[in-house]
Every structure is written in C-alpha cells, then in structure tokens.
Amino acid sequence: MRRDDDGSTASGRRPLPLTDFATPIATIDRSAMRSNIVAMAKWCLDRGLFLAPHGKTTMAPAIWDEQLDAGAWAITVATTAQLMVARRARVPRVVIANEIIDPNGLRWLYAQLASDPEWQVICWVDSLAAVEIMSAHYDGSSRPIDVCVEVGALDARTGARTVETAIAVAEAARRSPALRLVGVAGYEGVITEAADSAALEDVRGYLRRVAQAFQLIAPLCEGDELLLSAGGSAYFDLVEEIFGPVRDAGARPTRVVLRPGVYVVHDDDLYARIAPHARDAGPDLTPAMHVWARVLSRPQPDLALVDMGRRDVSADVGLPLPQRALRAGRALPAAALTDAFVFDLNDQHAFLRLPVGSTLAVGDLVRFGVSHPCTTFDKWATILLLEGTDAADPRVVDVIRTEFSAKTVTAEGEADEI
C-alpha cells in the first residue's frame, strides 16, 4: 500500500478513477484508515496499554502490517485457519481470542512452536475439559502454549461463568506441562450493544469480575510478566478505567492488552454511536469503509433499486446508509438523497426509499456507509484503496486483499486439495 514519488502505486500503475470499476465496489479511504491506526496506537501508548488489533475484522495482512508498524504489540485471531494466515504473514506474536481444542489444530500448533523458538502464541482456556484436551495432544517436544483463563458472562460466548470456575481452570493449567498460564482475559462486547449509562455500568460490572479473577489467579501465573486482556472497539475506555488500577497495584508487571478490530475503518452507524469517541472518551476516528453501487431502476417516484445486496454489504446490525451520489464525474446536490434510506436488501439489490422529486437517475453512482464493517470485509476478496473519498471523482491508488476463505485444517497445515 505504497505510492511512489511519481504518483504510481506499489503495483506500478497510476491511480485510476473509481468510475473505471464495475459496481458494486467496496472501498477504504487510505488516509482515513491510516489516521485511525495512528490515533488508536497513540491513545494506547499514552495510557501504557498494549494493542493487539483483532485481525479477523479485516483478514488483510497488508493492514496488519500497518498496525504492527504503528506499534501494535500483537495481532489477534479467532480460529486455527486464521492463525495459519498470520503464520504465513510472519506475524511475530499472535493472540487467539478463543479456545483451540481440535486435535489437528493443536498438533499443528505444537509443531510450529517446536520449529520456531521466537514465535509467540497466546490463547484462551475456560474449562477443565479444555485443559485435558490440550494436554492430551502434547508430546513434550515443543514449548507449552501460553494461555489466559477466559472469564465469560451468562448466556454469552465462551468463558468461565464464575470466578471459582476460573480459579479451578487456572490451577489445572498451572499443573499441565502442555500449557503456561500467563494471565486472564475476557470480552466485554458481549454484554451490550448500547452506550447509555445503564449499559456502561453493566460493562463495568463485567470488567470488575474479570479483574477480580485476575487478582486471584495472578499468583498462579508463570513468568515475570502477566497479561490482562479485554477491549473490543466499543468499550475499550472502560477497560482502561477498570484494568488500569489493577495493573498499577499488581506485585508483578502486567500488560493490559486491548483487542479492538473495527477501529481501523470505524463505521457510520453502530460504532459511530457506541464507540468511546462518541462519549469523548477515546481517539477521534473517521469512517473509512464504503460500498458504492449504481442505480439500476427507478420504477416508482419514491423508489430506486441499486446493484448492491446482502452479498456485498453488511446488514447484521444496521442497513447501509446512502451518503452521496455521483453522475458523470461530478457530485449531485445533497438534495438528491435528502431523507433517503435503505429499507430492504435482496441478495444483489438494495431498496432505496427516496423523497418524491429526487433527481437520482438510472446510472448514478451512490456511496453507502456501513454499520458493523466486520461483515462487509468478509464479502470481498479485494477492496479498493481510495484517495479522496469525498472528491467528485475519487481515485483508486491500490488494492487490499483479504483472506477469509474457509480452510480445512490438518495436522500438517491447510488442506487445499483432498
């Protein structure tokens, strides 16, 4: 993602107008993304926090490189297949914010740790059964896997449901030669998707329980330095609020590790409403990801159909948001989309409600903001990097490639053919 002095991109080609590409198109504003990466890195640095961005958001090693270059301590993933992508991308330290208990994945991981004494992997464990499975596939020839005990919440994702269970798991992990107990982790994003005072207090309550478990488990941990980790993209300010004093009061050095993912491109809806900067408690972030589509049909005065649907844009939290329209290399007046909104999606169509009298016409190009961009990233193998997203004729300067394709994993690696 580099532009040379002569204006050409890393591919050797000069920037192309966005209108040269077929629709629908997913894009990222390069300047906005880089600004978000730097802002988050600085926010963490100023507070003595360590950043392990969740790589599953983008599954784009080129973006991971930018995050690591900006000071990220690690990259986080969620599955064995994603870990293999990080391994191929030469990510030196990987956090697996999940349980790894499938036999082939474990055998592969132990083999990798044996072959490379510098590669660091940290994963979660939340039960005695998980400790037993991880131990059963350890043959003693490699380093143990570093683990954090995960503390969960009722009816939410993985994680020990009580502090007492977390302590029992920690004691079992400490006894196992296959594992090295290094800390405690959780994920507060499962508690709520709101940011009112009651929701924020619920998040604080969960984080206090994680912190309590950490204080009780810390004496069991191995190594000179401990880990205490949480922090998605919505409430990382609260993680600092609750975990900071625990870190500072500890008998041993403790890294508080945040794992946000969406911050890299932010969004125009969910995180715009609930992320820390919306309550003046986090870094300033700019929406950087958009999907562009052309108007296919104006069959009614108040309706436009565009060539973008569920296969192209996220809709799991909120529908895409029409923002601006272009025609023949110029921007249409804002009135063309005044009060316009998407009210439904098919596989390849979006239904755009328009005010009667809108000048939007068949062939016009419309930019849409997204909500929860995680599930837009995974729809695209290539995403265009833009400069000048707000320009009348934005320019494509490079391409980001993602690696979301599901992989079948064997003990030797990924099975592309069987």
Image (cartoon, grey):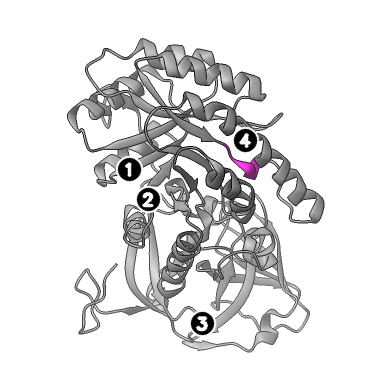
As helix, strand or loop, the secondary structure at mark 1 comes to strand
Q: Which residue appears at 65% of the width and 41% of the height?
A: 207
Considering only order in the chain, which callout, 1 or 3, is on the residue closer to the N terminus?
1
Q: Is residue 192 magenta?
A: no
Question: Percent from the top left, x then y, of residue 60?
Answer: 37, 53
Label 3 CA crowd tier, 10 Å (few <14, some 14–19, many 20+): few
Task: Report the quarter where the C terminus lies.
Answer: top left
**In the displayed structure image, the side of residue 197 where residue 402 appears, left or right:** left
Element under label 2? loop
Residue 210, numbered label: 4
- The CA distance from mark 2 to mark 3 is 33 Å
**SS of the residue under disc 4:** helix
Q: Amino acid at mark 3?
A: Asp
Q: Which residue is labeled 2 in the image?
A: 73
Disc with the residue nearer the chain's start (1 vs 2): 2
Q: Nearer the viewer, residue 246 or 367?
A: 246
| Quarter of image, res 182 | top left
The Cα–Cα distance between marks 3 and 4, rounded to whole angstroms, is: 43 Å
Discs 1, 2 touching: Cβ within 8 Å? yes
Give the x, y percent position of residue 269.
66, 63
- For the residues labelled 3 and 1, say whether their Cβ atoms are less than 8 Å apart: no
Q: Which residue is tagged 3?
A: 390
Which element type, helix, strand or loop, lies under badge 3?
A: loop
Residue behind mark 1: 93
Tag 2–tag 3 contact (CB < 8 Å): no
For label 4, the crowd category at 10 Å Cα-Cα, with few meaning under 14, some 14 to 19 and many 20 or more, is many
In the rendered structure, which amino acid carries the disc numbered 1? Arg
Please name the residue shown 40% across and 36% down the image. Answer: 406
Magenta stretch, residue numbers: 186-190
The residue at 59%/79% (across/down) is 324
